[in-house]
Image (tube, rainbow, N blue to C red):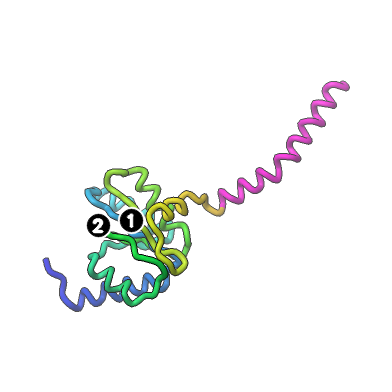
Amino acid sequence: MAITREKKGEIVDKLTTAFKGAASVVFVNFKGLSVGNTTEMRRTLKNQGVSYTVAKKSLTKKALEGEKFEGEAPTLPGELSLAWGADMVAPAREVYGFMKKFPENLKILGGIFQGRYVLAGEVEEMAKIPTREVLRGKFVNIINSPIQRFAIALNEIAKKKA
């Protein structure tokens, strides 16, 4: 079914707003993903504050033309969807998690981070950055480790003397 000119304009406006307001955007190829898996992914993304939409490549390119991003836009073969959000890493991390679940159906094509285009490899590297809570936990563990080892050493000394 053909999309009307007004609907196309609305989609381009929505994408343009997304590109301006988002901290990061991830381009995703979703060939062969079932409706149930897509629904699960959408719910998970929404819970993490990430917006997700399927868009025609021509409309996406039209929305990107108005923006001034550094670098060269990645090639966008196949079916295209976009994930974006206010968090820099959340869209990439969440899509990457589903990409690991469905490697034959999902593929990261590239993205936009801090006003520049990035390739798929860079997006995947950013997706591997742990969440803030995990990083805080690791930091506390690093700080606690010498103190814990010192306490164990004192305990062993006390055992030998007793």
| Residue name at image x 32 percent, y 50 percent | 107
Residue sitting at x 34%, y 53%: 108
The residue drawn where x is 88% and y is 22% is: 161
Identity of the residue furthest to the right in this view:
161
**Measured from the top left, where is residue 125 in percent x and y?**
46, 51
Q: In which quarter of the image is the N terminus?
A: bottom left
- Extent of the magenta region: 133-162
- Determine whether, in the image, residue 141 is placed left or right of residue 89: right
Residue that mark 1 sits on: 109
Amino acid type shown at disc 1: Leu
Quarter holding residue 43:
bottom left
Give yes or no for contact between labels 1 and 2 (Cβ–Cβ under 8 Å).
Answer: yes
Q: Given the image, on which type of amino acid does mark 2 rest?
A: Pro
Q: 109 or 132, which is in the foreground?
A: 109
Quadrant, the C terminus = top right
Give the x, y percent position of residue 132.
55, 54
Q: In this view, does 51 lie to the left or right of 148?
A: left
- Disc 1 is placed on an element classified as strand
**Circle 2: is it few (<14), some (14-19), or many (20+) Cα within 10 Å?**
few
Q: Is residue 76 magenta?
A: no
Image location of residue 66, percent across then percent down: 33, 77
Tell me the SS state at disc 2.
loop
Residue picked out by circle 2: 77
